[in-house]
């Protein structure tokens, strides 16, 4: 029964990933695209976590950590780019 539930969760999460991808491509505003990409990263972390539960292994835990770190850094960089127009400031104050 638990395996069936995990497969249903994988199907629903894959639909959620597809919806986030569509929003990231079609999104009417740049901020909508940034939020969609951030949500895509979070859904991907959950998707990989469910795959780990289906397979009964902890082999992908490092992958989850790397995706989490990259999603966080990407969200911060995109937000800073939208606010100021540059990611790295070259001020010599």
Image (cartoon, grey):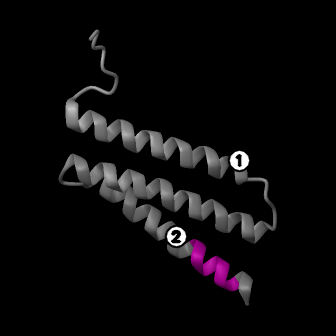
Residue located beneath label 1 in the image: 62
Q: Quick one: which residue is furthest to the left in this view? A: 28
Instruction: Give the vertical position of 4 relative to 37 (above or below).
Output: below
Instruction: First in sequence, mark 2 or 1: give its number.
Output: 2
- Tell me the residue at 29%/9% (across/down): 92
Residue located beneath label 2 in the image: 13
Magenta residues: mostly which secondary structure?
Answer: helix
Say whether marks 2 and 1 touch (CB < 8 Å): no
Q: In the visual, does 63 lie left or right of 78?
A: right
Q: Nearer the viewer, mark 2 or mark 1?
A: 1
Instruction: Give the vertical position of 50 relative to 48 (above or below).
Output: below
Q: Position of residue 57 (x, y in %)?
A: 81, 62
Q: Quick one: which residue is furthest to the bottom in this view? A: 1
Query: Which quarter of the figure is the N terminus placed in?
Result: bottom right
Instruction: Give the vertical position of 4 relative to 89 (above or below).
Output: below
Q: Secondary structure at mark 2?
A: helix
Write down the region rendered in magenta. Answer: 4-10
Q: Position of residue 11 (x, y in %)?
A: 55, 74
User: Residue 8 is drawn in which quadrant?
Assistant: bottom right
Instruction: Give the vertical position of 20 relative to 31 (above or below).
Output: below
Q: In the visual, does 8 lie left or right of 83?
A: right
Q: Nearer the viewer, residue 14 or 87?
A: 87
Q: Position of residue 79 (x, y in %)?
A: 30, 41
Query: Which quarter of the figure is the C terminus placed in?
Result: top left
Q: Secondary structure at mark 1?
A: helix
- Tell me the residue at 34%/58% (across/down): 22
Q: Position of residue 4 (x, y in %)?
A: 69, 84
As for residue 64 lying within the magenta part, the answer is: no
Q: Residues within 10 Å of mark 2 (few under 14, many from 20)?
A: some
- Tell me the residue at 71%/53% (across/down): 61
């Amino acid at each position: 029964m638990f395996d069936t539930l995990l497969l249903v969760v994988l199907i629903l999460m894959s639909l959620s990933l597809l919806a986030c991808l569509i929003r990231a491509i079609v999104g009417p505003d740049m901020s909508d695209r940034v939020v969609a990409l951030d949500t895509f990263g979070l859904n991907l972390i959950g998707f990989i976590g469910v795959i780990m539960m289906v397979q009964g292994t902890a082999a992908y835990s490092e992958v989850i950590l790397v995706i989490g770190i990259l999603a966080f850094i990407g969200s911060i960089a995109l937000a800073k780019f939208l606010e100021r127009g540059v990611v790295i400031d070259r001020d010599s104050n």
